[in-house]
Amino acid sequence: MTGPALRQLIASPHPDRAPLPPAAVREPGVRELRGVPYRQAMGSRPLELDLWLPGTAPTAEPAPLVLFVHGGAWLQGRRDDMGLRTRQWSPGPFARIAAAGFGVACVDYRLSGEACFPAPLDDVRTALHWLTLRGPELGVDTGRTVVWGESAGGHLASLLALDGPGLAGAVIWYGPSDLTAARGPFRPEDPATPEALLLGAAPAAVPEAARAGSPLSRVHPGAPPFLLVHGDADTMVDHSHSASLAAALREAGASAELWTVPGADHGWHGPDEAEVERIFTRSLEFVRDRTSKA
């Protein structure tokens, strides 16, 4: 056997059909599956996700899902990192969410050094498709999904929520919403910004791509409810990104709650531990409200 037939035979199983890894229990009542491949994009590393699932085994009643998208300026970051202020938590934030009765999927996406926009959005969309396909095995109900992202991940989470897949809601922590106009330290004519690296050129030089990559330009009346949480002292992503997106969503007839955190810089740098806990708890309450069955 030679040529394409052999290549197909020795290739790794397609992520849609590959066996799931065994679950580990590191926190009481929470199962973890780490490094599960969900996509093999041509010419790219395999993209993986981590899962935190409630209980000791899938139950007859599938759990609602949180799809988490990490930050890192689209340049770097780890899929299992909710940001600076949660890294030392024990149990960690995702185990906490799972212990509250939700499945959590933390996904890889191609970074700007690997592929330009819309590649990372395509990846997150593919992850949701994979989770829907494998949901019965995992015990999750993607019909009750809230996407949750921080910083650059908040940008991608916003785009996914506005993309029309019927999500139950979106929790966005200090995410960029506009790649077209100067806000805070961002200047669209600068070819060296993370936004320029994401688009492959200075946003001002590729206005159509910048608009396509801006959640603010994708707002529509059928958008799911948003919880936008942003510090008023953010020196990296100006608070106006969340304020403008909230206003646009409301003007379109969609639901949007804007929570401004006084004195908070990017990554929740500044507030005390109690305030960060309150932000996390309120975000989780939003997920519960949006996924509970009437």
Image (tube, rainbow, N blue to C red):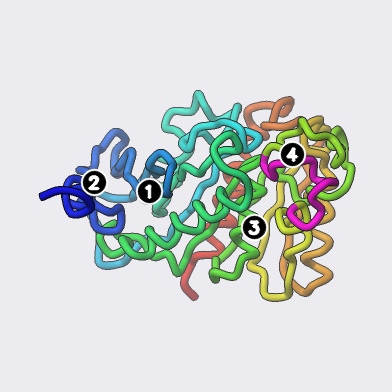
Work out whether residue 131 or residue 7 is closer to the camera in this orientation and state it.
7
The amino acid marked with disc number 1 is Gln
Q: Which residue is mark 1?
A: 40
For the residue carrying disc 3, how many other residues have a C-alpha within 10 Å: few (<14), some (14-19), or many (20+)?
many
Query: Is residue 201 one of those drawn in magenta?
Result: yes
Q: Secondary structure at mark 2?
A: loop
- Give the mark, 4 or 2, whose residue is nearer the N terminus: 2
> Magenta region, mostly helix, strand or loop?
helix
Work out whether residue 201 or residue 247 is closer to the camera in this orientation and state it.
201
The amino acid marked with disc number 2 is Ser
Q: Secondary structure at mark 4?
A: helix
Q: Residue at x 67, y 34 (%)?
A: 275
Residue 258 higher or lower than 249, as above or below: above
- Give the mark, 1 or 3, whose residue is nearer the N terminus: 1
For the residue carrying disc 4, how many other residues have a C-alpha within 10 Å: few (<14), some (14-19), or many (20+)?
many
Q: Which residue is mark 2?
A: 12
Query: Is residue 177 one of those drawn in magenta?
Result: no
Q: Which residue is mark 4?
A: 196
Q: Residue at x 61, y 62 (%)?
A: 161
In the image, residue 118 lies at what x, y percent?
Answer: 61, 53
Numbered tag placed on residue 89 in the rendering: none
In the image, residue 140 lies at what x, y percent?
Answer: 35, 60
Is there CB contact under 8 Å for labels 1 and 3?
Answer: no
Is there CB contact under 8 Å for labels 1 and 2?
Answer: yes
Work out whether residue 173 or residue 187 is closer to the camera in this orientation and state it.
187
The amino acid marked with disc number 3 is Leu
Q: CA distance from mark 4 to mark 1?
A: 25 Å
Q: Which region of the structure is painted magenta?
A: 198-209
- Give the mark, 1 or 2, whose residue is nearer the N terminus: 2
Q: Quadrant of residue 153?
A: top right
Is there CB contact under 8 Å for labels 4 and 1?
Answer: no
Numbered tag placed on residue 159 in the rendering: 3
